[in-house]
Image (cartoon, rainbow, N blue to C red):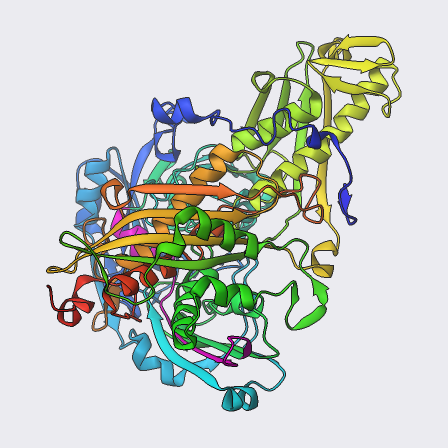
Amino acid sequence: MKFDTPAGQNPIDQLKVVGKPTDRIDGKYKTTGTAPYAYERHDVAANQAYGYVVGAGIAKGRVRRIDTSAAKRAPGVLAIVTTLEHPRMERGKMNAAYLFGGDEVQHYHQAIAVVVAETFEQARAAAFLVTIDYAPVSGQFDLAAEAKRAKPVPGDSGEGSGGNGEERVGDFEGAFAQAPVQFDETYSTADESHAMMEPHATIAAWDGDKVTLWTSNQMIAWGHGSLAKILGVPKENVRLDSPYVGGGFGGKLFVRADAVLAALGAKAARRPVKVALTRPLVMNNTTHRPATIQRVRIGATKDGTITAIAHESTSGNLPDGDPETAVNQTKLLYAGANRLTALKLAHLDLPEGNAMRAPGEAPGLMVLEVAMDEMAEKLGLDPVEFRIRNDTQVDPSDPKRPFSHRDLVGCLTRGAEKFGWSKRNAKPGQVRDGQWLVGLGMAAAFRNNMVMKSGARVRLDGSGTVTVETDMTDIGTGSYTIIAQTAAEMMGVPLDRVVVRLGDSAFPASSGSGGQFGGNSSTAGVYAACVKLREAVAQRLGINSADAVFVDGQVRAGNRAVPLGEAASKGELSAQDTIEFGDISKKQQQSTFGAHFVEVGVDADTAEIRVRRMLAVCAAGRILNPKSARSQVIGGMVMGTGAALMEELAVDTTRGFFANHDLAGYEVPVHADIPHQEVVFLDEVDTMSSPMKAKGVGELGICGVGAAVANAVYNATGIRVRNYPITLDKLLDRMPDAA
Ligand code: MOS
């Protein structure tokens, strides 16, 4: 199905199943431990052996020699594969770092060997007997030091966030110089780890020259193609299966060393082999969100109309890596005739920087929305009012291009009202509750809506059960449920008559899960397949498909009512289709909007920061399942709080690695850190986005929330921290005198 004109009325609009708060259909498996993750797929292949990955102990240089003789004699060892036995293997097209092969070390903990043994403990013990001779060379690990040499480069997160090395509208410098009120500050954000619960893991088994990988991956079609290329095997000989994923956040968009080494280990051991990356390897072997240094300049008239806005970001990466596209939102969020956005990239020899939840916008809004708060104060304007005053209904760089639907103002006003914003004291450091200095902060949320081609197959059997098959993944987001809701709505059956099967490369290729495009795109693909199945049903029953009504498990036409299953009584009916999006998303700008409001308390003596309550108001098209969408947004709010207050991969700039490579040293918020959270969705549909009229929401929740936290800390204390995260040491010696 081609989607190239706005969606009209269709069966989804009935909203009998879609749009209803619905428990996740995989919830009972998740909560009872019966949803097997990749490493737990004990039943898929007999005689599984264990692989343990050896990571490089230097950040840059060469591997001269690997001595495996002692390891080979260790108990239980079946095979050892080293990087020196393979020429450097190909890499996926979205990746900068090579995963295995050859003697060059590009980054610390790059995989250089896998030891396969009967048990995990034997594999691990033997791995420590492998001795490696390196020829290290010095590398560049310090972004602040390398930023001076950074070069303008275009960047694309592959997830709807991108930009050129430099983009200009009007005359920024001229307008900024003339602006009666000027703001110019520089900020930094930290390297961050996805820190998903389930580490990267794969079981691989060969059958002749065919290989199956039971793995944990967000994008099956990408992974399928990449693995075929990396292993040098035709695509039809590779199968990936990933029905349950314990979180990804962008860290599992790509196949990683676990998949490659499970496949190589299984070949060498002639046994199925399972490999999980240890937590240190998750942090230094895979990808992370890169640190940034960002400068924002805003020029405005005295009444708070922005006349000039510039946002420049510098980040680092390995050669061939992309910059973090942190200026993306600044192209679209606020009006202003004169604009400049720029991306610079420095060469760093750290592990690869790549997409993490809302790549670009998450660190970009962390900075832009603090800058807006600072500018509002300079102007003597309420920060909500300042944003409303600079709203735009068109793309500021191309005013003929409207937004398909934009209600940022609705999010801001509704949120302000609900949160009690009018009671905020604009003068910082004034509100005390016992030991706590109390502050309120807010920020806008913005994330583009991307649409991706997505396919599905839908089958109907004689019992009236509808089975959906697509390689779409559920990374904890609720894909199973919204796909079932879509098929139930389309075929007129209750939710429990729908079976959803996901994550297998043998199924039609979907959008996958990334860039908050998965929910809308994959359900649109299921919609397309269901349109075809409805036609097949009508034809089988001898009904004109335009007259057929699918409701209550029946097909009705005129005064005829037939149980749906009857259409398949002489054999299963099956339909397959792919939704493909024309240039509709280019003609109008599709984006999602929100507003975050946060109250914090800062301990007057210790500067300990506590989030007291949070509210997000989101405008993101039709909400397919308000329950799972809310979970996505509150999860994003937790993650954004982490970015604001604690998450930071600490770079050892001498040895070139992330030193706090475990969940003791890399802190993420826990339940005790996050109290009351509320989410409101504005009631809206976007007919330009898809037949579902939905948009993405999974990344919107993290966008801007960190800035709202930082602005609240400022309101509480009067201390403006511009280097994130805001850890205690950045506040302590600047705290106001305790009364
Ligand atoms: Mo992407 S960072 O997995 O949504």
Q: Does the rendering let one see residue 263?
A: no
Which percent across, then down, holds residue 668? 27, 50
Vertical position of residue 259 compared to residue 479: above or below: below
Tell whether 568 sits left or right of 89. Answer: right
Residue 381 lies in the magenta-colored region: no
Residue name at image x 40 percent, y 23 percent: 29
| Residue at 77% from the left image edge and 13% from the top image edge | 567
- Above or below residue 158? Residue 236 is above
Residue drawn 40% across the image and 58% down it: 442
Q: Quadrant of the N terminus?
A: top right
Q: Nearer the viewer, residue 271 or 511?
A: 511
In which quadrant of the rendered view does residue 11 lie? Answer: top right
- Is residue 184 among the parts visible in the rendering? yes
In the image, the segment drawn in magenta is 278-307
**Residue 106, percent from left and from top:** 35, 67
Q: Residue 571 at what x, y percent from top left?
A: 74, 13
